[in-house]
Amino acid sequence: MLPKGLKLEYIDLGVIDLVVALNRVPGINTATTCHGHWKYAPPTLPSKSGWVYFFTERENPLHYDLVERVKNFCENQEDFSVEPIDLEGSRKLWQISTCFELENLPPQKDPFSNWDSNQRRNYYKRAKRRWLRHLRGFGDLSQIVTTFLKEKVSENPEKLKYR
């Protein structure tokens, strides 16, 4: 169940369960999010990575435990990563992100523009499968956070305040 007042138009559906779960952990809140995108639009690349940024408290053992679970998941996934972004003060920003195979190449190294139509079509197919895998991964992360909430915070996480 989604919290009252949650504006769905501001959150991509592929990450909404993860965003809601993270925001139910006391002291954690999310920042910008995107579930990534796939679009068949030759001759441009069909994909864009996804991300979820979230803030934790630096010295909170509960948050440390959750981040370790997220790290463990990401380390075991081909396309997922989680990285800290150091900020001044008592809060720490984390970025969970996904990536596509050609996305991080500099423009001069992008082979896509030189591919024939068959190579591009094959890339589109691979990119769509990868994007669907990213969406499943965000769903899996949501379950990890929900399980964490049940174990560490409340047996009924849906009753926790959405922050």
Image (cartoon, rainbow, N blue to C red):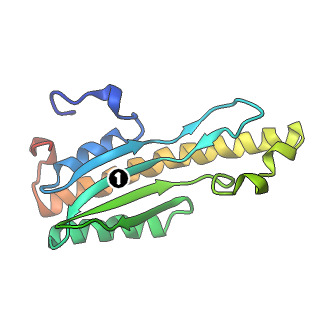
Image location of residue 56, percent across then percent down: 22, 62
**Residue beneath the point at 55% across and 43% down:** 132
What residue is rendered at 11% in x and 53% in y? 155
Where is mark 1, residue-wise?
A: 53
User: Which residue extends farthest right?
Assistant: 116
Whether residue 18 is visible: no
- When the figure is inspected, residue 117 is found, relative to residue 92, above or below; the finding is above
Q: Position of residue 30 (x, y in %)?
A: 27, 49
Image point 31% across, 28% down: which residue?
A: 8
Q: Position of residue 94 (x, y in %)?
A: 34, 61
Asked if 69 appears above or below 79 in the picture, the reply is below
Query: Quarter of the image containing the C terminus?
Result: top left
> Is 112 placed above or below 144 here?
above
Residue, x 56% and y 63% (percent of image)?
Answer: 78
Q: Position of residue 63 (x, y in %)?
A: 20, 66
Kindly state the secondary structure of the residue where label 1 is placed: strand
Which residue is outermost to the front?
88
| Disc 1 residue crowd, few under 14, some 14–19, many 20+, Cα 10 Å | many
Viewer-side residue, 76 vs 49: 49
Q: In the image shown, does 27 or 121 lie closer to the viewer?
A: 27
Q: Is residue 13 left or right of residue 46?
A: left
Residue 126 in view, yes or no: yes
